[in-house]
Image (cartoon, rainbow, N blue to C red):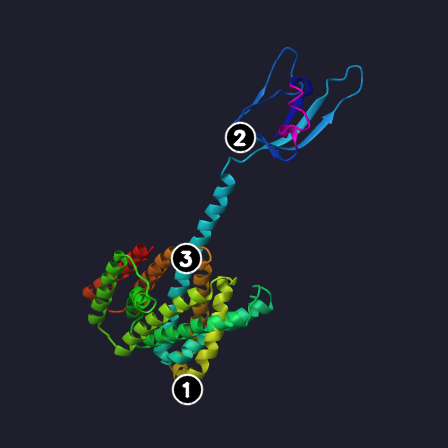
Amino acid sequence: MICSLKHSALSPTTINGSDPVVRRNTRLAAGKAFFLSPLGAPKGLKGSLLVSKPLHLTSIEAFSPKGRNARPRSIVCKAYEAEPVGAGEAKPEAARKAKIGVYFATWWALNVVFNIYNKKVLNAFPYPWLTSTLSLACGSLMMLISWATRITPAPKTDFEFWKTLLPVAVAHTIGHVAATVSMSKVAVSFTHIIKSGEPAFSVLVSRFILGESFPAGVYLSLLPIIGGCALAAVTELNFNMIGFMGAMISNLAFVFRNIFSKKGMKGKSVSGMNYYACLSMLSLLILTPFAIAVEGPQMWAAGWQNALSQIGPNFVWWVAAQSVFYHLYNQVSYMSLDEISPLTFSIGNTMKRISVIVSSIIIFRTPVQPVNALGAAIAVLGTFLYSQAKQ
């Protein structure tokens, strides 16, 4: 939009060089109407242009033609309409919400895919310690390559960082292995139903070990969690004590992981992606010797040959997929923590469990009794109520 102003049509104060109206790259006051007289209007015809929206002046050119028949001096203003007040703030907020939505959708999808491939691998290759080790090794290798190629900036760490990360890595390792052991013995849906009871462990540990107190609503929300998990466990058709205890140990370990992480990482300027990468590498160093001691290369070699003979080359793809997707879904979940509050993350984690339980039942055709499904629904609902009461 280009507007031409007659010098004679404006008062001296309007075109004064110190007036903000004619300064370059300034905005006219919002909500004020500004009248511009058109250049070259016929004699006797008074026209005007009403601009109700603020204008942003980008350039002003003044010229005074010479000659006897020259027209009066004019000023050419080039301008465009300014954005409404608050529009600049609305766009970043909308973009942030869209980014969080993408994180959540990616997180849930990756987690579902990981659980499917992980269960396929464990059905054909029942060695959860090696499977857990490969998951951490794959993620560590992926991050080392991304740091070496500068796809992702490497974190700046020191000895104090790794010292505070050590207890977090120990708890993470125990929780990861215990969950994998559980899924090697029972259905994926049952493991995640029991793991939805993690808030109960969190409250109990915080209350009796850390001495923290909670509102009455938090304690009441534990009743449906505990009752739902108990109902699901009692009515589980393929119940296995090792699988049940593995899920319970995983809950307890991840509670301590969260506690150690909150206490040790205060003031540390490491992004969620790099934090989880460092956690995976340290957990890998902790887990590897135990995996060798518990299972060992001889058992792995025999099991690997047996799986290849039964499944074929697709088994290798299953192992690679479960390792890659394990790292990716955890990485995205830690990245989302940089953008959202703990309450939103807790709700997202609850919805993630629902998606995993439902998808695994459909894909693996897990037989579910109505009472068992009711117990799972009550436990998941209790987890949601807990997240609300905790906030």
Residue 181, compared with residue 113, is above or below; it is below
Query: Is 168 on the left-hand or right-hand side of 36?
Result: left
Q: Residue furthest bottom?
A: 298
Q: Residue at x 36, y 80 (%)?
A: 126
Residues at marks 2 and 3, CA–CA distance in whole angstroms? 39 Å
Residues at marks 1 and 3, CA–CA distance in whole angstroms? 38 Å
Q: Quadrant of the C terminus?
A: bottom left
Residue under pointer 2? 30
Mark 2 burial class by Cα count in 10 Å: few <14, some 14-19, many 20+: some
Residue under pointer 3? 104
- Which of labels 1 and 3 is toward the front? 1
Do the residues bearing badges 2 and 3 touch, measured as CB atoms within 8 Å? no
Query: Is 131 on the left-hand or right-hand side of 71?
Result: left
Give coordinates of residue 330: x percent, y percent.
43, 66
Mark found first going from the N terminus, 2 or 1: 2
Q: Residue at x 73, y 20 (%)?
A: 73
Q: Quadrant of the N terminus?
A: top right
Q: Quadrant of residue 254?
A: bottom left
